[in-house]
Image: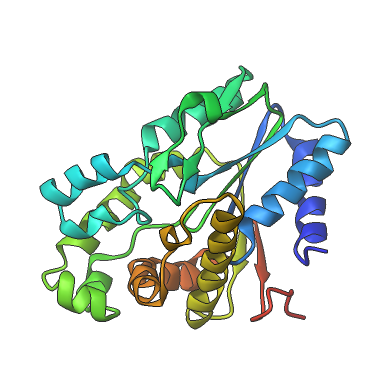
Amino acid sequence: MIASLEPVAQAVAGWLDAARGPLIVGICGAQGSGKSTLAEALVARFAAAGVRAATLSLDDLYLGRAARAELARDIHPLLATRGVPLTHDVAAGCAILDAVKAGVPVQLPRFDKASDLPLPPDAWDAPGVVDLLIFEGWCVGAQSQPDADLVEPVNRLEREEDPDGAWRRAVNAALSGPYRALFDRIDRLVLLAAPDFSIVRQWRGEQEAALRERLRAEGRDPALAMDDAALDRFVQHYERLTRAILCNLPGDADLTLHLDHERSLKT
């Protein structure tokens, strides 16, 4: 049983009743907090009740390696790593959300993290017309930070690889620009609030372990999943914004659920 399912399902049911047309619900949460599992359970719950429901992950809007290599060359080398704002196809995301609201059939892209590439269109989901779209992602709904908050690095990655703050300023500018336009298309926002940032490394490690097992089962190279050293560096890309989300977003979300270290709801 997913601890967050019932309170979120109850909230979504109320929002659907009050909506005048298709509803887009954003789910924000740190890596490994259970966003994808919750989104899939919500789709199953509402589909069983006759609601045309689908889920889109922000991760499925990632740019491929070649596009990120251009960002790394033109803006900052750290943008070669997927994850932070600027590394997604925001225009595609806006077009999808607009199509949902317009009541026209949609196709939902999918991204293969093992190969680090978007899947071809013939591998996309095609739910058709959607009454309820669950749009989940680690920074969905995030706000940009004040310039003063960008001055001091938050970890070793920022100190050593972004000493002048160019990367974090570029990411922050994207949040207040194209990503703001994307997130403003969300009707309601749910936050799965991790107890602290320190748990993110553990949760993300569990995801990589699961990916490694899936790769083995598919006869693919399990080394496509990150090892511990790569994972330690990877999660540092997310630290600044995750900490800001945990501090600021509870006041902006329509529903905030506080999780403990086991992803159960705090009482």
Kindly identify the residue that appears in the image at 29 percent across and 80 percent down.
155
Q: How is the image coloured?
A: rainbow
Q: Is residue 210 above or below residue 48?
A: below
- Residue 134, given in percent of the width and then of the height, sits at 64, 43
- Residue 216, given in percent of the width and then of the height, sits at 56, 58
Tell which of 180 and 215 is nearer to you. Answer: 215
Tell which of 191 and 32 is nearer to you. Answer: 32
Furthest toward the right, the residue is 49
Image quarter (top left, top right, bottom left or bottom right) of the N terminus: bottom right
Is there any visible trace of residue 29 in the rendered image?
A: no
Is there any visible trace of residue 151 in the rendered image?
A: yes
Image quarter (top left, top right, bottom left or bottom right) of the C terminus: bottom right
Q: Quadrant of residue 47?
A: top right
Kindly identify the residue that appears in the image at 61 percent across and 54 percent down.
217
- Residue 173, given in percent of the width and then of the height, sits at 26, 52
Kindly identify the residue that appears in the image at 16 percent across and 67 percent down.
165
Tell which of 54 and 202 is nearer to you. Answer: 202
Judged left or right of residue 203, residue 42 is right
Q: Quadrant of residue 88?
A: top left
Tell which of 105 and 78 is nearer to you. Answer: 78
Q: Is residue 54 above or below residue 75?
A: above
- Residue 8, given in percent of the width and then of the height, sits at 75, 56
